[in-house]
Amino acid sequence: MKTRKVGKYQVGRTIGEGTFAKVKFAQNTENGAGVAMKILAKSTILKHRMVDQIKREISIMKIVRHPYIVRLNEVLASPTKIYIVLEFVSGGELYDKIVHQGRLPENESRRFFQQLIDAVAHCHSKGVYHRDLKPENLLLDSHGNLKVSDFGLSALPLQEQNDGLLHTTCGTPNYVAPEVLGQRGYDGAAADIWSCGVILYVLMAGYLPFDETDLPMLYRKINAAEFVYPIWFSLGATSLIKRILDPNPRTRIGIEGIRKHSWFRKNYVPVRQKEDEVVNLDDVRAVFDDIKEQYVAEQSESKDGGPLIMNAFEMITLSQGLNLSSLFDRQQDYIRRQTRFVSRKPAKVIISSIEAVAESMALKVHTRNFKTRVEGLSVNQAGQFAAVMEVYEVAPSLFMVDVRKAAGDTLEYHKFYKSFCAKLEHIIWKPAESNAKTDLLRTMSCQS
């Protein structure tokens, strides 16, 4: 078992993993609040020449403070690591909600779109353009409100060239504006608006307006704004989307035009924004100027023998609110980028079973300290797919396995999880097999 403390934060399980960083759940020991801690190795940042990009992302997230944007609390550094302390958002990704429901009702789609526009308008008022808006980067809090995240591709005005335009092609192709794909200068605000229009379409339709496996064909359809409206779209929604998905950025509707549109204005309640806070970037400068006097203290204790023990506070944060039953009930929830199942088998048996199933699926397997990473080529052979499984002890002889996507397409991960979980049925604890008396134990199963 291993416990770790960074400054005033007790660091817990991994809740996200990317190419250059891990995100862990942590608890502020001074006030008990849960946070998300993004951890980056300085050596990796230097090796990939990402210092400017990371510094920009941190600075941007400090500047754009808004109720519908994930809040950056502070940034810390040690001799080898950078720790970005973020608001912990417990409701998952908007993408997961769409996958689960297929499509959202028009009123619910409108509410999310209104919140998205409010957040994007605030960014633009600060001279910040997100450039990678998509449902995977839109989180939901415990009240079901939107939180825009992942500003890694954001641009500030200083990145504009002499023509006042941006010139870097980035983002996810299905959500990217035609002028961005055209590899010519583009207006960051207009490009973000296009992405918002695609998101609105996806919310209401349950699928993408532009979705081709052949990239040249995808680009052609985006450039021509060639797509079909489902029959259930209202006339108001159709008229607004048509003005947003205008391939000409000069005639494309802007933020103010969207806010004045009759469809948008229905039940619209502008968010109550606090007066602009004074943003202090001293901690950012301390981290990137390598001021050793301000290094955070790191403490780590290791004990051999078993998997990590998950405490009650961490278990509660796995669910929305205090209803722990939804953590383990396969019927109540749906597959997310991070999923989990419960087993009464010994931890070593769980790990060996995971390894056997992964190998039977022709995946590479790496295991260390009750944590297994599986890797393979994506379905289209275009990139790598990876998932991580980590075993936690939640009660004596009761273990929970967190399964999370580490690389690859989210939809592909959904398919992988279903197949993988089906092959592990012999170790998954099902409610019918238990005579436990409590509601929590009666509902434990494989969450999907």
Image (cartoon, grey):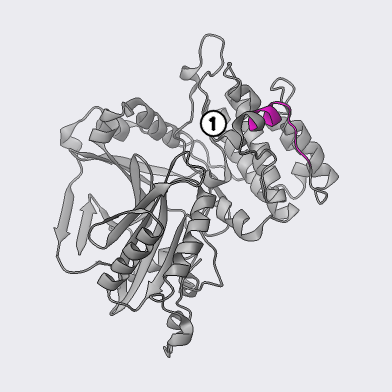
Q: Amino acid at mark 1?
A: Arg
**Residue at the top extreme?**
162
Please provide percent x and percent y for residue 158.
Answer: 46, 18
Nearest to the observer: residue 157 or residue 403? 403
Residue 226 in magenta stretch: yes
Q: Residue at x 44, y 36 (%)?
A: 61
Q: Quadrant of residue 345?
A: bottom left
Quickly name the residue at label 1. Answer: 131
Name above or below for residue 383 compared with residue 435: above
Q: Is residue 154 left or right of residue 244?
A: left
Identify whether 183 is placed above or below 201: above
Question: Residue at point 61% right, 27% down?
Answer: 189
Quarter that holds the N terminus: bottom left
Name which quarter of the figure residue 317 lies in. Answer: bottom left
The spot of residue 444 in percent (x, y) is 45, 77
Range of magenta residues: 218-228
User: Farthest residue in the right direction?
Assistant: 235
Please rate how many residues cluster around mark 1, counting C-alpha atoms within 10 Å: few if below 14, some from 14 to 19, many from 20. Answer: many
Classify residue 103 as left or right of residue 305.
right
User: Is 175 situated left or right of 42 in this image?
Assistant: right
As drawn, 116 above or below 320: above
Near-viewer residue (359 or 398):
359
Depth order, front residue of 70/219: 219
Residue 170 in picture, x, y percent from top left:
51, 28
Q: Is residue 250 visible?
A: yes
57 versus 97 height, above or below: above
